[in-house]
Structure formats: C-alpha cells, structure tokens
Image (cartoon, rainbow, N blue to C red):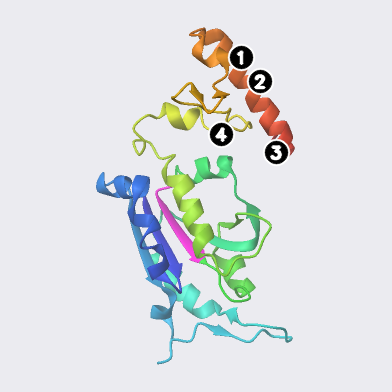
Amino acid sequence: MNIDIITLFPEAFIGPLSSSILKRAQEKRRLVISTHNLRKWTIDKRGTVDDRPYGGGPGMILMVEPIDKAISELRTKDSYIIFVDPSGKKFNQRLAGQLALKKHLIFVCGHYEGIDERAKTSFAHEIISIGDYILTGGELPTMVIVDSVVRLMPGVLNKEESTREESFNNNLLEYPQYTRPETYKNMRVPKVLVSGHHGEIEKWRKKQSMVKTKKNRPDLL
C-alpha cells in the first residue's frame, strides 16, 4: 500500500510513522508512507494556505486551490482520498478493515478553523473523524487511522490470528488478560485461567468481554 499525507506539519509524523509495526511494514516493503507539505502547492512567496471565511467568523480556513493542486499531483487511478475532519464519519474497526484493502490512500489533514467545503465535496471519498472532541489539527487523527489500518494489512503482523481475535472485531471489547506471577501482593489470577480447561477458559473470556462491553461501550452491542 502507498499512503500520501498532505499536511502543514510533516515533521509531526517522523516518530509515529517510523517505529514499531509501521516501521516493520515499511521495511518489509508492504507499505510506503510519504508526507507532503501543503505549502509546496501555494502560488505566492509566503506559502499562503489559508484565508478568512466568507460571511465572517473566527479563525482561518484552508483554501481549496492548494489542496486541489496537491491532490491532482499525487492522485493515481487507485487513489482513495480521505479528509480528516471533525465533521466526518466516526472511525471504527470496520472502516479500518475496508481501508486496509485499498492500494493507495491520500490523507488531507485539516487545520485552523477547517477546510473550504468545496475541497471536501469535490475530492473526498471519505471524511473521517476519530471522535467527538476538538484537536489542534488533523495530524494526530491521521496517525491513529494509519496505525489502525496498516496493522490489518495482510503480512504486516506476524500472526494474522491476532487481528481476527482483537477487540471490536466481533463488536466486543477484549477480555481481561493476565501473566506471571500468578499471585502478586495478594492479587491472584482468576482460577479458571490456570485450570488448563480450555473450554471453560473460552467461556470465561466471552463472558468477561460481554460484561466489559456492556459497562464501557454499550453502543457496540
């Protein structure tokens, strides 16, 4: 997969996109990630990318022209274009799985008070939000989406079973996990997990997943 990220702050991606699973995916040549400064496609010496909103209001809006030029240069026949914006569809595991099947993703990171609506309606295949809260820009949400998508790509993780059994894949949160020592400061691992009875362990895990989901994320049920 190829991923192109259009942003005002390409330096923000250096650490998160070059470590752990994302680093290994790139080393395996299953993934190529490129960041691009939107100012590259501006028409003045100052690199102006934003302007005041028509009709008045606070802040500045990213202009349609540099976004159009950036997308036009980066787009291929396989491109799927995503605008990261609070107004978009809420990101979830199902959407991550769909995006993991694409050959080329182009992300446009919003900033300031938003993006000229003409850019969204003209170019975006998806407009995605990672939650109902406000961040400084679209850089952090893009990192979240990229991480979630890449780990679902075939051959990225060592054990594909780990992706099938993970949280949210079956609309349930993951069951509690424990490791050694069996007892620590009077806190014991549940007996069923050290019983060796795999059928009972599986039943316990399903029950605990349901309990946790009902408590923390009833919207998933």
Q: Earlier in the sequence, mark 3 or mark 4?
A: 4
Q: Residue at point 62% right, 73% down?
A: 114
Q: Earlier in the sequence, mark 4 or mark 2?
A: 4
- Separation (CA) of disc 3 from disc 4: 13 Å
Residue placed under numbered mark 3 in the picture: 216
Q: Nearer the viewer, residue 184 or 17?
A: 184
Under circle 2, the secondary element is: helix
Mark 3 vs mark 4: give the one in front.
Answer: 3
From the viewer's perspective, is residue 58 above or below residue 217?
below
Is residue 106 in the magenta section? yes
Q: Are marks 1 and 2 in contact (CB under 8 Å)?
A: yes
Q: Residue at point 42% right, 67% down?
A: 12
Q: Nearer the viewer, residue 147 or 107?
A: 147
Q: Amino acid at mark 3?
A: Asn
Give the side of residue 138 with respect to residue 215, left or right. left
Image quarter of the C terminus: top right
The magenta stretch is 102-108
- Separation (CA) of disc 4 from disc 1: 16 Å
Under circle 1, the secondary element is: helix
| Chief SS of the magenta region | strand
Q: Are marks 3 and 1 in contact (CB under 8 Å)?
A: no
Q: Quadrant of residue 113?
A: bottom right
Q: Amino acid at mark 4?
A: Ser
- Separation (CA) of disc 3 from disc 1: 20 Å
Residue 203, label in figure:
1
